């Protein structure tokens, strides 16, 4: 199984793509928009179609975020990417902030303005991150707006298609247990909790539980998907 570890970056992405995104933001009456690195599975490594932070900024690292306003843009990275982000992202268009010292919600607590409408894609944020953003909203007075369509997707004319790579079996010899055994263990845990089923949303969980692998993301052999495991192990 061969994979690419180098998403293609271009320092001109900010100058090319920020105006396109801002047009979509204006059409949606948004003053700002949150761009996490994560995809809808909260993966660290992404399929090309989910590289929204890369598209808007040029930054190709595996962790980070940005907040795009009508008149400014801020990108957040941790210490691993101090040099890389400055090489890849044009500082004529982006301000640089250390993600560890000042995560996006903390930055918004200080810099968000009362009445601003700041959009977010609900598929790209964990419940805990949304709690932090809501606390920042309460403190600074800006309004969080849940968008039905990600404006980056609308602004990205040649966005790659979602991956449709084959899912392949991962032998029990290497997995250690059969999928049947694992599903029985999960079912027992579900019944112990008094539940009827569990919803699995992490591709890592699917790869482990069903003993499968895939090529849907860079650098990790994951098949993207979700699953429901019932208390009878189906």
Image (spheres, helix red, strand yellow):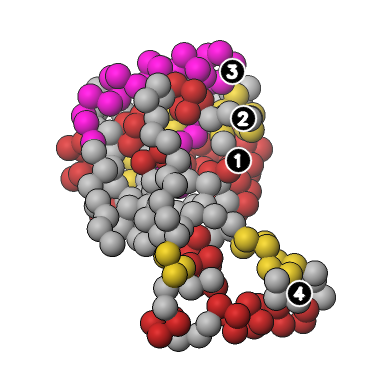
The answer to whether residue 32 is seen in the rendering is: no
Q: CA distance from mark 1 to mark 4?
A: 29 Å
* Residue that carries the numbered disc 1 in the rendered image: 122
Badges 2 and 1: C-beta atoms under 8 Å apart? yes
Q: CA distance from mark 3 to mark 1?
A: 16 Å
Q: Secondary structure at mark 2?
A: loop
Image height of 117 relative to 188, above or below? above
Q: Which mark is residue 28?
A: 3
The quarter of the picture where residue 229 lies is bottom right
Label 4 belongs to which residue?
231
Camera-near label (1 vs 4) is 4
Please tell me whether mark 3 or mark 4 is closer to you in this view.
Answer: 4
**In this picture, residue 85 sits left or right of residue 189:** left
Q: CA distance from mark 4 to mark 2?
A: 35 Å
**Boundaries of the magenta span:** 9-38
Percent of width and height locating residue 213: 42, 65
Question: In terms of sequence position, does the residue under pointer 3 or pointer 1 come before the other?
Answer: 3
SS class of the residue under badge 3?
A: loop
The circle on residue 42 is none
The secondary element bearing badge 4 is classed as loop
Q: Nearer the viewer, residue 117 or 219?
A: 219
In the image, residue 26 lies in the stretch drawn in magenta? yes
Q: Residues within 10 Å of mark 1 (few under 14, many from 20)?
A: some
Residue holding disc 2? 147
Looking at the rendered image, the disc whose residue lies closer to the viewer, 4 or 2, is 4
Whichever of callouts 3 and 4 sits on the residue coming sooner in the sequence is 3
Mark 3–mark 2 contact, CB under 8 Å?
A: yes
């Amino acid at each position: 199984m061969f994979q690419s570890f180098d998403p293609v970056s271009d320092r001109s992405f900010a100058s090319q793509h920020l105006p396109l995104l801002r047009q979509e933001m204006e059409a949606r009456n948004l003053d700002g928009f949150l761009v996490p690195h994560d995809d809808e599975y909260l993966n660290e490594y992404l399929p090309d179609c989910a590289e929204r932070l890369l598209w808007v900024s040029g930054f190709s690292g595996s962790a980070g975020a940005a907040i795009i306003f009508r008149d400014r843009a801020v990108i957040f990275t941790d210490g691993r990417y101090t040099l890389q982000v400055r090489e890849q992202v044009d500082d004529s268009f982006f301000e640089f902030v250390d993600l560890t010292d000042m995560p996006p919600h903390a930055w918004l607590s200080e810099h968000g303005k009362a009445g601003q409408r700041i959009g977010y894609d609900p598929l790209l944020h964990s419940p805990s991150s949304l709690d932090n953003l809501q606390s920042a909203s309460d403190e600074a007075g800006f309004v969080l707006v849940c968008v039905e369509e990600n404006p980056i997707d609308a602004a990205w004319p040649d966005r790659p298609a979602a991956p449709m790579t084959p899912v392949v079996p991962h032998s029990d010899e290497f997995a250690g247990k059969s999928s049947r055994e694992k599903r029985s263990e999960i079912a027992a845990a579900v019944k112990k909790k008094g539940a009827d089923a569990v919803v699995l949303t992490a591709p890592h969980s699917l790869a482990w539980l069903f003993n499968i692998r895939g090529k849907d993301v860079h650098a990790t052999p994951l098949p993207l998907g979700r699953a429901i495991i019932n208390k009878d192990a189906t």
